[in-house]
Image (spheres, grey):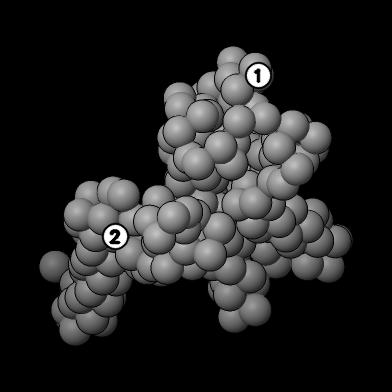
Amino acid sequence: MRDKIWARVLRIIGIVLLSLTAVFTLMGGAGTSCVALNPTGYEGKFDGIAPFQWLYILFVIVTLAIGAMGVRAAVLLIRGAKNAYRHSLVALSAGAAVGIIHIAASRILRGGSMPVDMVVYTTIVTLIVFLLFRIPGVWQGVDFEKPEGGKGTGRHAAAIALAFCGVLTLTIQFLMAPTHTMVGVNYADVWHSTMNVVGAALILAGAGLLVHREGRMRLATALPLADPVK
């Protein structure tokens, strides 16, 4: 049975949201490493966490691991693999739980928690969306693991997710500038060249995947059906 359009759209939205959340989480973990490794090096803004440097190093390790779990879950969703939805919920729930602890610790130790808040809010929003997918009437169409979901939707979602993640990678230094600028230096832009290369590569990969998919579909439509008699 052919999928309804709304079901395909919701599946794509879910995969794109999870992919963006996973990449944002990885960026958050990488960004926290700067403070975790040098808590006294930013004009005293993070001196409060210095006695608990070990905790922030742990936050970095766990957050990066959760981000990797999110990427894996997104790949499983794209493939329509068994338990893909469950893996997604585990990654999102873990990200929300660790993020909330991170926020609480930062507010207690240094009187503020930005920019980790944005990562956590994004994770919670994505988690809520995935929980809403389980509404019976919605899940009947969205179900990421049913065979009739089709690989076409997964490839389409993968292409869009790659492109969106590329845009996020290229613009993150501007989005995070208000919370990362100290003494006139935007620390969200310290990996400028690397982020530009990665972001551009993700966008090109997404565009290439989309073009490849459309090309295969047109080729399949153009080729004449084989004569069963021959």
**Rendered location of residue 70, percent (x, y):** 54, 42
- The mark tally for this picture is 2
Q: Which residue is located at x 26 percent, y 71 percent?
A: 207
Q: In the image, which is nearer the foreground, mark 2 or mark 1? A: 1
**Rendered location of residue 99, percent (x, y):** 70, 39
Q: Which residue is located at x 63 percent, y 70 percent?
A: 10
**Rendered location of residue 115, percent (x, y):** 60, 52
Foreground residue, 96 or 144? 96
Residue 199, numbered label: 2
User: Image check: 28 left or right of 102?
Assistant: left
Foreground residue, 44 or 211? 44
Secondary element at image label 2: helix
Query: Is residue 33 among what the camera can see?
Result: no
User: Image check: 49 left or right of 159?
Assistant: right
Instruction: Tell me which label, 2 or 1, sits earlier in the chain.
Output: 1
Quadrant placement of the C terminus: bottom left
Q: Amino acid at mark 2?
A: Gly
Query: Is residue 45 among what the camera can see?
Result: yes
Q: Amino acid at mark 1?
A: Phe
Residue extending furthest right? Answer: 136
Q: Which residue is located at x 60 percent, y 23 percent?
A: 50
Residue beneath disc 1: 52
Q: CA distance from mark 2 to mark 1?
A: 34 Å
Q: Residue 195, relative to residue 178: is it above or below?
A: above
Q: How many C-alpha atoms fall within 10 Å of the one at disc 1: few (<14), some, or many (≥20)? A: some
Residue 63, numbered label: none
Quadrant placement of the N terminus: bottom right
